Amino acid sequence: MNMTTQPSCTILVVDDNPTNIQVLFDVLSESGYDVAVAKSGESALSRLQSHLPDLILLDVMMPGIDGFEACRRLKTNEHTKNIPVIFMTALSDSVDKVQGLSLGAVDYITKPIQHEEVLARIRVHLQLRNLNRALEHQVAERTSELNQTLNYLKQSQVQLVQSEKMSMLGQLVAGVAHEINNPVNFIYGNLNPATTYVQDLMDLVKLFCEDCPSLTPRIKDHIAAIDFEFMKGDLPRLLDSMKVGADRIRQIVLSLRSFSRLDEADMKRVDLHECIDSTLMILQHRLKAKPEDAAIELVKEYGHLPMVECYPSQLNQVFMNLLCNSIDALEEETATQEPSKAHFPMIRIQTGCLGSDRVFIKISDNGPGMPEDVRSRIFDAFFTTKPTGKGTGLGLSISHQIIVEKHQGQLLCDSAPGRGAEFTIEIPL
């Protein structure tokens, strides 16, 4: 006999007739198949819980669970639904073959069994099953390749968005800083001579009053109208406050220039605390109290950090993204909480060293936190929980890319509902 089958193929014969079982067992064994036997639908279903054959020959007419019911149960089970089922029925049986095929059977053979016929049908359906498996494997491989390509395209898109965003942001910040810097320096530079001139004028008025004690009524009235004594004491304080304000603007301009760092596109050794502080300076307006929101307490627990070699402008973008997310979460919780429940929003920033070759920056908040299904996806490109128009879903994805790919570090998130969120950045020195 021509042996064309693979010995590893197992055929399960389900029949309540011992003679039929013996005939099929002999025919199939001689053809190189492994043969398993079940004498009822119940015993077949029980056997399938531990051993899965490659094909099932199933008698239709059996006591208890008949072949149709056994097939229906096979096809509704996730583990057995793909096993080919060939029904066996006697020529004398009145069987609705359409019903059997609609239940998921692949074929019928009739009794008495014709050896060549049953072997031919078994070979065909095993070959079809092998072809289906090969096709499914190819589809799975192709799907995996397509998913990899899609992820690559997403990452490329994120990189393009990041590059364009940083370029535009840097140009905007640098432009604003430059435009503000010139008039502010003009004001700040003229405040000292203006203070000197005002003091000279005040001294002149004092001398005039001392040498000419008899003032005319018109001068006396004017002195009273302008409240000269108050003005004399308040004017120096006014000039000092103007100097403080101008100096504050100069510091903001320096922070903007430090944040953009357009001249630092390459790796550079920097003080990360200065990077964080320049970002906080820009976000200062969001930390202050508003009519609808309480002020956000900022706790800085800076450890000793050596200079770190990094891409400063890109790290500033990470700090900006993480801090903005914390502020958004705290503002959202304040907006949704019950008025009777007091909440004191807080952001904590911790820094320190990990051994001799790494540093960490932790940014945590006491906001609402995130469920696991959100936390596990926050670094996915274009994933966002914010309303349409408020979030692009790129901030954390870009941050993860900057830390992991550009700096060979780690960006981790620990969060749960009701206990806030903590982001940990780890980068090598």
Image: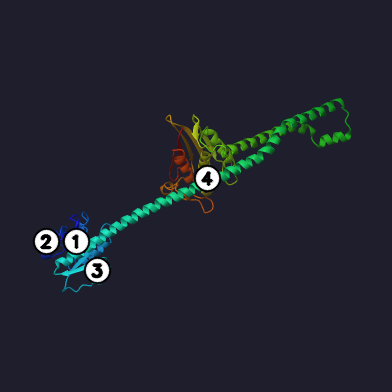
Q: Is residue 62 at all visible to an observer of this figure?
A: no
Q: Along the horizontal axis of the image, is 116 left or right of 174?
A: left
Crowding at label 1, few (<14), some or many (≥20) Cα neighbours within 10 Å?
A: some
Camera-side residue: 160 or 42? 160
Measure how far apart labels 2 and 4 are at the Cα level.
72 Å
Closest to the camera, between mark 2 and mark 1, is: 2
Q: Is residue 271 at all visible to an observer of this figure?
A: yes
Q: From what the image shows, is residue 27 above or below residue 365?
A: below
Residue for point 89% across, 32% down: 216
Reading the image, the residue beneath label 2 is 26
Q: Earlier in the sequence, mark 3 or mark 2?
A: 2
Measure how far apart labels 3 and 1 are at the Cα level.
18 Å
Measure how far apart labels 1 and 4 are at the Cα level.
65 Å
Look at label 2 and name its amino acid: Asp
Label ID, residue 163: 4
Q: From what the image shows, is residue 148 above or below residue 98?
A: above
Reading the image, the residue beneath label 1 is 42
Camera-side residue: 61 or 139? 139
Crowding at label 2, few (<14), some or many (≥20) Cα neighbours within 10 Å?
A: few
Measure how far apart labels 3 and 4 are at the Cα level.
62 Å
Look at label 1 and name its amino acid: Glu
Reading the image, the residue beneath label 3 is 100
